[in-house]
Image: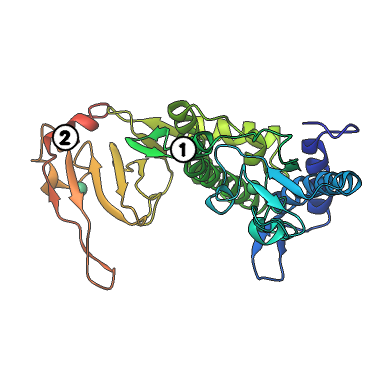
Amino acid sequence: MNTGAFSYQQAIRRAILDLAQNGLHSVVYPSGHKDTIEVAVRRAVLTGVNQTAAKLQLARMDELGCDLVETTAHAGARPSHAVWQGRIFSRSGTSRKYPDFATSTGYGTGAGLCGWNCRHNFYPYFEGLNKRAYTGQQLKDFEKKEISYKGKDYTRYEASQIQREMERRIRKSKREYLALDAAGLDTSQTAATLAKRRQALKDFLKETGLRQDNFREQVAGFGKSAAAKARAEFKSRTLTNASGKLIIIVQKSNIKGPPNGITQKNNAKGGIDRNYYGFDGKQIKQISNNDHGHKAESHFGKHGEHAHDYIYDEKGNLTGRPSRNLTGAEREENLDIL
Ligand SMILES: [Zn+2]
Ligand SMILES: [Zn+2]
């Protein structure tokens, strides 16, 4: 879409960079709701354009003396908008046949028609002259669960919400990366998380056939050079194990790590240790491809390869890490180092 002078996206980008350079990173609304500037500016620009169009439409209708309006409809509308999309309303509220426009659609409020992020619009409707733009069946079809992802079916709206969440996570990783980088701290784990989240979105889009919205993945300050740096870091600091799972190479291992992730560290006594983390980021086990210098563990496997399970008390303190032989599945997954 184009506003003539420059595109929405250029307008938004310019505004965000302006604000970021002045040190503004988030916007708190009177309701207490907080948005990052990327989200707030995008919303303000899109909403402003839509509201201007709506006001012009109303002025035109006043000239025509037209009381009835028909709202537009599209697949993927949020549920609170789906209820009034593609329907006829009376602006004066005096029609016996059609409900009041403003109270039904919330026109003029942030949450309503032409409000925040709303892509709906409306047109004059002349009873007896116009045909309805949408049939009841078409309106129903807009709410079909027609998108499947990982074996579940979603409406276009639901799928778009999943995509928005994934985009939010990508932006969060980028922001985190920039903050760590600016502080001169290690960014490798964030770079890996970012790559993982990007891949997840890519897989999602491929499976659902939905369109990528590059713009929603952007973060002020995270430009081409930061992206290239993060990618290079990710490449040099990661590998995949025999079953294709992502492994992050670390210099120091920690009892806390990437949630559901695996890290790898060269043991000082030779050999390789792989650290497995649970959903909460706490280490659950370690797999080593030799006895890492422990005599007592040299009898495991063929040349000392073994696992440690990490045991915690109810307060979450580590109480032990007993060793044992690798299971068949663990062997298979780590064949690349055994
Ligand atoms: Zn809407
Ligand atoms: Zn050991």
| Colour option used | rainbow
Q: Nearer the viewer, residue 160 or 167?
A: 160
- What percent of the width, then of the height, locates residue 74? 60, 37
Q: Nearer the viewer, mark 2 or mark 1?
A: 1
Quarter of the figure with the N terminus: top right
- What percent of the width, then of the height, locates residue 86? 62, 42
| Image quadrant assignment for residue 231 | top right
Q: Nearer the viewer, residue 246 or 185?
A: 246
Amino acid type, mark 1 = Lys
Q: Secondary structure at mark 1?
A: helix
Q: Nearer the viewer, residue 299 or 142?
A: 142
Q: Residue at x 39, y 33 (%)?
A: 148
Describe residue 314's horizontal placement relative to residue 268 as left or right: left
Describe residue 334's horizontal placement relative to residue 96 as left or right: left
Q: Which mark is residue 196?
A: 1
- What percent of the width, then of the height, locates residue 301? 10, 35
Amino acid type, mark 2 = Ala
Q: Which mark is residue 146?
A: none
Label total for image: 2
Q: Which residue is mark 2?
A: 329
Specify whether residue 111 is in view.
Answer: yes
CB atoms at circles 2 and 1 under 8 Å apart? Answer: no
Looking at the picture, does residue 316 appear above or below residue 309?
below
Looking at the picture, does residue 264 appear above or below residue 112?
above
